[in-house]
């Protein structure tokens, strides 16, 4: 706890020094991050993280949830067990392998579909979305399996068919666990560095064309940590990125704890 | 009986304690001289293979000497680590003055290792093999959007660049683009190898790499009237001046390693062109006219062979 407080204090102090030196608006709302030319805008990294996070959510939730429903409620016991094992195996794949897969598969696909170089926020969003599908699916499947059979039996006894029971009873009862699964997946997306860095294109400019190269908070820290020394404005900007990332993950963590208590 | 067991256990514990103390103190058989503290070298990725090979050779020839630990990480990272005392020497293809500023850079000494030619590479399908410097500048800064504008294929131009801290990026921005930044739509890659891979895989792509990293799958673009030839790399006009830097005074172990390095002749095998082999004196003096690199004023050929000297003058752009 003390260590965490010390780290946060250090990050806050560095961020305040940067804001005092470069100004709040250019730092928080600047569209470019170019330390060599005195531009320290953090918006490109925040924008990149938001876009990748939303894309990952849009792709991974339907896929993960479908997989979970099939595994937990539709397949026979033996097939369901095999599917759960497959989920666990996919969760354990290192992110660098997913990044490699994204480089070889997603980047060319995005290039073909949307034009441009292929490297960009879309490629990063799709790559990490596929990466977290097993995580979302495994956690959601566990929640679905935990729904008491008596609830579903009661629904069927009242004349509801399987689909109605699934939508109105099973998914409703498992909602806290499913939300927790989605938030866990989102936390992994937000914190992911290597897989994103390999396909995102690394360009620290905020733009609406999300198929073009961009950057996220994690890739910004990774790229600039070694190149920008501590105590320099660039180093302070890296600290500010880390502070923003810490704030986002803390916020997600609080929600996860609350949901954990609920379920 | 119980007393004897206690005594044996106490003796074992004492023996272990003695061994542990000897290990912690670095003690060994009497008469064997302790190895000096290791030398930490960090910096340019492009120089890492050469320095790692030289470290291995040094250990083989001088087993009693300090171990040399080589880590890549980029020129900027190497210089910053050196300045903070986290490295004993920095390998850099960016002038220290451009990174550290005058006061800090003046505390360093440096030796030139040689030139690292930086070449423009393009996707094989762009349909252009030679560009003028002006056109290369317009391509890399994003002002030319299609290869058709240069008489090439109907492909959009995709610029692939390197991350901040890359020596190749510094060379391109300062020697070719005259301080202008590379296009803000460029794909940023971490390494020479990643640039080559991205250019080879992306139709319409153009990038730049250290010449030693060119691989099949990309085409080297001629620049002005020059065409890069691996047999005569010294004739190529775009290059970084690679150097090794350290804080004064160099401790004896580091000085010994530097002396060993100076005596090693086969830098060309690692893509490093020795300054003495450069044939274009005029172009060298203009392209490395910054006094921030040792030997960069054109007056010193093969500074590694000519010894160390202090850095002076210059400033960050």
Image (spheres, coloured by chain):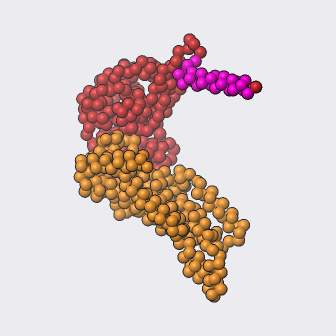
Chain colours: A orange, B red
Q: Position of residue B228 (x, y in %)?
A: 41, 38
Residue located 60% across and 71% down the image:
A144
Q: Nearer the viewer, residue A244 or A193?
A: A244
Q: Position of residue B151 (x, y in %)?
A: 37, 54
Q: Nearer the viewer, residue A61 or A104?
A: A61
Task: Give the quadrant of the C terminus of chain A.
Answer: bottom right
Q: Nearer the viewer, residue B10 or A209?
A: B10
Image height check: is B279 above or below B200?
A: above
Q: How many marks?
A: 0
Using the rendered view, name the quadrant where residue A117 is placed.
bottom left
Q: Is B114 displayed left or right of B27 in the figure?
A: left
> In the rendered image, is residue B141 in sight?
no
Residue located 59% across and 76% down the image:
A170
Is B196 part of what is drawn in magenta?
A: no
Q: Position of residue A96 (x, y in %)?
A: 53, 50
Q: Is B24 displayed left or right of B92 in the figure?
A: right
- Name the residue at the top extreme: B31
> In the rendered image, is residue B98 in sight?
yes
Image height check: is A223 above or below B232?
A: below
Residue located 38% across and 34% down the image:
B81
- Name the residue at the bottom extreme: A159
Q: Main secondary structure of the magenta part?
A: helix
- Looking at the rendering, the stretch of residues picked out in magenta corresponds to B2-28
Q: Nearer the viewer, residue B15 or B190?
A: B15
Image height check: is B227 above or below A159?
A: above
Q: Is A14 displayed left or right of A259 in the figure?
A: left
Is B6 part of what is drawn in magenta?
A: yes
Q: Is A13 displayed left or right of B70 in the figure?
A: left
Q: Position of residue A199 (x, y in %)?
A: 47, 54
Residue located 48% across and 63% down the image:
A256
């Amino acid at each position: 706890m003390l260590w965490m407080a010390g780290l946060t204090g250090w990050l806050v102090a560095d961020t305040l020094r940067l804001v005092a030196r470069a100004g709040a608006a250019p730092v928080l709302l600047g569209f470019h991050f170019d330390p060599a030319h005195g531009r320290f805008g953090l918006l490109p990294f925040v924008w990149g993280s938001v876009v990748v996070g939303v894309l990952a959510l849009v792709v991974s939730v339907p896929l993960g949830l479908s997989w979970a429903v099939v595994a937990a409620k539709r397949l026979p016991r033996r097939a369901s067990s095999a599917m759960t094992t497959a989920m666990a195996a996919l969760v354990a794949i290192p992110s660098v392998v997913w990044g490699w897969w994204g480089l070889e598969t997603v980047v060319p696909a995005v290039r073909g579909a949307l034009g441009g170089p292929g490297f960009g926020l879309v490629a990063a969003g799709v790559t990490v979305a596929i990466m977290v599908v097993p995580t979302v699916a495994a956690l959601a499947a566990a929640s679905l399996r935990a729904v008491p059979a008596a609830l579903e039996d009661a629904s069927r006894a009242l004349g509801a068919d399987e689909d109605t029971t699934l939508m109105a009873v099973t998914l409703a009862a498992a909602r806290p666990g499913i939300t927790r699964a989605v938030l866990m997946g989102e936390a992994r997306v937000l914190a992911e560095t290597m897989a994103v860095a390999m396909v995102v294109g690394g360009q620290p400019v905020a733009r609406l064309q999300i198929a073009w190269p961009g950057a996220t908070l994690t890739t910004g820290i990774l790229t600039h940590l070694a190149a920008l020394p501590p105590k320099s404005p660039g180093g302070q900007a890296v600290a500010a990125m880390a502070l923003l990332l810490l704030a986002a993950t803390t916020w997600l963590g609080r929600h996860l704890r609350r949901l954990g208590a609920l379920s | 009986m119980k007393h004897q067991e206690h005594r044996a256990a106490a003796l074992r514990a004492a023996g272990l304690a003695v061994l542990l103390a000897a290990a912690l103190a670095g003690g060994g058989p009497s008469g064997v001289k302790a190895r000096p503290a290791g030398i930490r070298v960090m910096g340019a990725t492009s120089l890492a293979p050469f320095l790692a090979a030289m470290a291995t050779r040094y250990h083989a020839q001088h087993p009693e000497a300090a171990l040399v630990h080589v880590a890549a990480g980029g020129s900027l990272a190497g210089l910053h680590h050196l300045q903070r005392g986290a490295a004993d020497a920095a390998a850099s293809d960016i002038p220290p003055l451009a990174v550290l500023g005058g006061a800090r850079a003046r505390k360093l000494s440096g030796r030139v290792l040689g030139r690292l030619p930086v070449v423009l590479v393009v996707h094989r399908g762009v349909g252009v093999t030679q560009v003028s410097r002006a056109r290369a500048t317009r391509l890399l800064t994003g002002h030319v959007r299609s290869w058709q504008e240069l008489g090439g294929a109907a492909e959009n131009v995709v610029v692939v660049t390197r991350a901040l801290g890359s020596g190749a990026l510094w060379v391109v921005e300062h020697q070719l683009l005259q301080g202008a930044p590379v296009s803000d739509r460029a794909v940023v890659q971490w390494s020479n190898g990643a640039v080559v891979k991205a250019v080879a895989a992306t139709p319409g792509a153009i990038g730049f790499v250290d010449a030693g990293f060119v691989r099949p799958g990309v085409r080297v673009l001629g620049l002005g009237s020059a065409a890069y030839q691996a047999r005569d790399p010294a004739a190529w006009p775009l290059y970084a001046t690679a150097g090794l830097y350290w804080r004064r005074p160099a401790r004896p172990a580091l000085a010994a390693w530097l002396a060993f390095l100076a005596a090693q002749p086969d830098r060309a095998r690692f893509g490093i062109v020795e300054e003495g082999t450069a044939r274009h004196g005029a172009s060298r003096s203009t392209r490395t006219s910054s006094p921030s690199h040792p030997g960069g004023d054109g007056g010193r050929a093969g500074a590694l062979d000519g010894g160390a000297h202090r850095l002076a003058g210059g400033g960050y752009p």
